[in-house]
Image: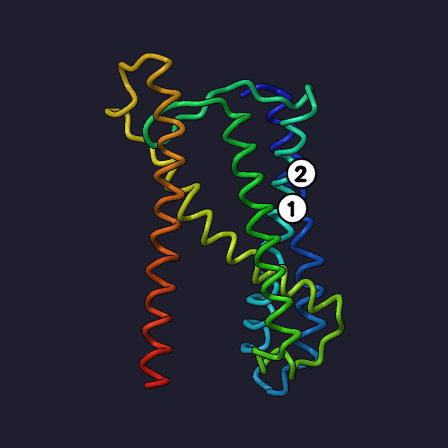
Amino acid sequence: MEVNEQWLNSMGSIGYFLAAFPALWIAGRIILRNYSGDNRTAQIFLWLALGGLILAPMTDFIRYISSILSLIVPLFRISADVTVFLGMGSFMVYSGITLVLGIVVYSLALYYLRMIVVRGKIPIVQELQIVKWELGFVLLGIAGLINHMVSSLVISFVSIYLPSLTDDKDIAQLLSGFWISWLLAFLVLFVTLWIMNNRLSKREDDLLS
């Protein structure tokens, strides 16, 4: 690992550690204002759970900043290759695709979450004693969960390493396999969403019939 990459990873780790404290502070404000029980253990449990929810987008933001630095700042640029499901490609391309995917997922999730909340489709949110900026962090946290699910379906699939499929192949085959891996990963995501949509449509038809 190069020295510059070590510094970038170290700064990211420091950022992850420090981000936990504002996440817990925001969660504490919300829990203290909304929890009416007298069970201290349950209160701490909810505090940590909500803090973890709020922490998710903060760590993603730090990770995306690290990706941007590695893409545009020569000092932090990483020249290594990344082995994926069926091939191998540049770390820069891999990092760029994951960055764009994360930004797209967050943008879509926040757009629809805000629309759902504004229309009052989640009554429990309407009943919370919460200020607008706190609600913003909660919505970011939910978007973060959605992003982690998409990442599990796409990035984790792409990152599977099968040596028998990548060994003894020339550069052209490895590059082709790199792009085929991404195509298959997005196909997995599309099929998963399609199945979920069909099941929800069927459930709506059953309720209306």
**Can you say whether 60 is above or below 138 in the image?**
above
Residue 22: quarter of image: bottom right
Helix, strand or loop under label 1: helix
In x, y percent, where is residue 150?
46, 51
Residue extending farthest to the left is 164
**Quarter of the image containing the C terminus?**
bottom left
Q: Left or right: where does residue 81 sit relative to residue 195?
A: right
Residue drawn at x 50%, y 19% is 80
As drawn, the label of residue 138 is none
Residue drawn at x 75%, y 66% is 133
Q: Left or right: where does residue 180 sit relative to residue 15?
A: left
Q: CA distance from mark 2 to mark 1?
A: 6 Å
In x, y percent, where is residue 144?
56, 56
Q: Amino acid at mark 1?
A: Phe
Q: Which residue is mark 1?
A: 61
In x, y percent, where is residue 46?
57, 73
What's the colour scheme? rainbow
As drawn, the label of residue 65 is 2
Confirm or deny contact between disc 2 and disc 1 (CB under 8 A): yes
Q: Amino acid at mark 2?
A: Ile
**Can you say whether 34 is above or below 197 in the image?**
below
Helix, strand or loop under label 2: helix
Residue drawn at x 40%, y 29% is 179
